[in-house]
Image (spheres, grey):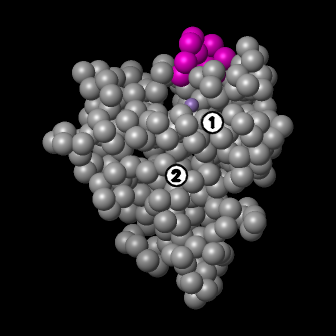
């Protein structure tokens, strides 16, 4: 396995996800690798949040939008993204069996049901998931639950890493310090949102793309992109799943321990890349 650590989001290149075997990707030859300075291009089937280079695709702003967008594949269907790490790689923080069931059964189920729900539906078919979530209403139960489920889990896998943990750096750290009064206070706010979400749902760190960060939480598979459903909207840059299926095998009823240990695996570079992308997209 090739381990990636130096994420970049510059005018030249950016990457969103780390992949377990990136250099063997059929989508990348050696010349491309050299050209991108070790930054990887990835097929969307591997990661629904595109990774790409400006050398290959459009402008930085377009790349930023793609980084934040989950799109269907060429056949018009959404696909289950591969994990960028082995299912046991997050142990002891998240156990192998939980990862296997969570990704291979729960997330796969959301993808399958989402495809079924949008098939033949003129409002949603062929749209990016972000577009779907921005327009879905509480009348579209299947699209709401399974579209949210696909987006939320795709994000969740991508903001975790076996080499994660620690604290954010750079602009993200400054933004967190400025908004919350320090990393510890952010951690407290995020953890409280995760622990106090009644029943099943998610806690989020979101941005308005203009420098403001907020901690919020949503029930079930709702998320802050569902502007016709939730009250506090924004672009999620970090999310934690607090459904019992995310932790119960290892932690049973101790949701607080799972939330605390989630901080050991947060991929802050990926969170920072999402913040940068959201700000670039919101620029006029
Ligand atoms: Mn889940």
Taking the spot 24% from the left edge, 21% from the top edge, the residue there is: 139
Q: Which residue is mark 2?
A: 81
Q: Nearer the viewer, mark 2 or mark 1?
A: 1
Residue 224 seen by the camera: no
Residue at the (46%, 36%) spot, across then down: 109
Residue 177 coordinates in the image, percent (x, y): 68, 37
Whether residue 63 appears in magenta in the rendering, the answer is: no
Horizontal relation, residue 190 to residue 233: left or right: right
Q: Which residues are magenta?
A: 193-201
Does the magenta segment cover residue 198? yes
Q: Which one is in front, 105 or 224?
A: 105
The residue beneath circle 1 is 101
Give the class, few, some or many, for how many residues have Cα within 10 Å of label 2's Cα (few <14, many ≥20): many
Question: Distance of mark 2 from mark 1, alpha carbons?
Answer: 14 Å
Query: x, y (%) of residue 108?
Result: 49, 41
* Placement of 80 over or under 183, stated as above or below: below
- Determine the residue located farthest toward the right in the rendered image: 92
Q: Percent from the top left, x then y, of residue 151?
A: 46, 40
Judged from the image, the quadrant occupied by ligand 1 is top right
Q: Element under label 1? A: helix
- On the rendered structure, is 232 left or right of 5? left
Quarter of the rendering occupied by the C terminus: bottom left
């Amino acid at each position: 396995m090739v381990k990636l650590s130096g994420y970049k989001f510059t005018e030249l290149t950016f990457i969103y996800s780390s992949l377990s075997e990136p250099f063997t990707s059929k989508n990348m030859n050696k010349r491309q690798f050299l050209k991108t300075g070790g930054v990887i291009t990835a097929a969307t089937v591997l990661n629904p949040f595109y990774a790409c280079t400006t050398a290959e695709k459009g402008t930085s702003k377009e790349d930023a939008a793609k980084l934040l967008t989950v799109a269907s594949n060429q056949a018009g269907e959404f696909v289950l993204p591969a994990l960028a790490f082995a299912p046991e790689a997050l142990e002891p923080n998240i156990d192998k069996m939980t990862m296997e069931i969570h990704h291979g059964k729960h997330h796969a189920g959301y993808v399958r049901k989402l495809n079924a729900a949008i098939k033949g539906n003129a409002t949603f078919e062929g749209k990016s998931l972000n577009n779907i979530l921005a327009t879905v209403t509480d009348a579209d139960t299947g699209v709401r639950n399974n579209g949210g489920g696909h987006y939320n889990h795709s994000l969740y896998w991508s903001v975790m890493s076996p080499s994660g943990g620690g604290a954010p750096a750079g602009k993200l750290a400054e933004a967190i310090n400025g908004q919350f009064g320090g990393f510890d206070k952010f951690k407290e706010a995020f953890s409280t949102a995760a622990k106090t979400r009644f029943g099943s749902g998610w806690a989020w760190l979101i941005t308005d793309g203009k420098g403001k960060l907020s901690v919020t939480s949503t029930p079930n598979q709702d998320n802050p992109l569902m502007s016709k459903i939730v009250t506090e909207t924004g672009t999620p840059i970090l999310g934690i799943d607090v459904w019992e299926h995310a932790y119960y095998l290892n932690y049973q009823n101790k949701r607080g321990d799972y939330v605390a240990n989630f901080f050991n695996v947060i991929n802050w570079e990926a969170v920072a890349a999402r913040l940068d992308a959201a700000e670039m997209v919101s620029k006029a």
